[in-house]
Image (cartoon, rainbow, N blue to C red):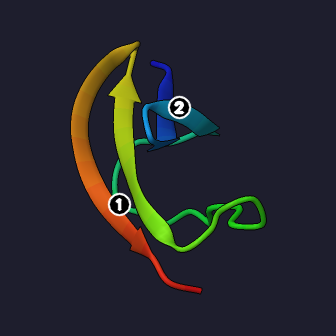
Amino acid sequence: MIISLKVCHKGQIIQNISLNSFGEGSIDVDKSNMSNSTYYYSLFVDGRRIETKKMIAKW
């Protein structure tokens, strides 16, 4: 099973994070290239999008 999290901004994928396990947990998103804005992140399992959520960045 291939699990990944994609972070998007204005329709562009800015991060693609491979995950090694399925279930509850947490990850750190590299925000060094991210400005204050609205981003969307999607969870993919075997290439199929499972869920998308909004993230509002205010650093």
Q: Nearer the viewer, mark 1 or mark 2?
A: 2
The amino acid type, in three-letter code, at marker 2 is Gln
Q: Is residue 21 left or right of residue 40?
A: right
Which quarter of the rendering shows the C terminus? bottom right
Circle 2 sits in a helix, a strand or a loop, which is it? strand
Q: Is residue 14 left or right of residue 23?
A: right
Residue 55 picture quarter: bottom left
Mark 1 burial class by Cα count in 10 Å: few <14, some 14-19, many 20+:
few
What is the tally of numbered marks visible in this picture?
A: 2
Relative image position of residue 12 (x, y in whole percent): 53, 31
Residue indicated by mark 1: 24
Relative image position of residue 51 (x, y in whole percent): 21, 39
Q: Which mark is residue 12?
A: 2
Of 14 and 2, nearer the camera is 14
7 is higher (above) or lower (below) than 53: above
19 is higher (above) or lower (below) than 53: above
Q: Is residue 19 visible?
A: no
Q: Is residue 37 left or right of residue 40?
A: right
Q: Earlier in the sequence, mark 1 or mark 2?
A: 2
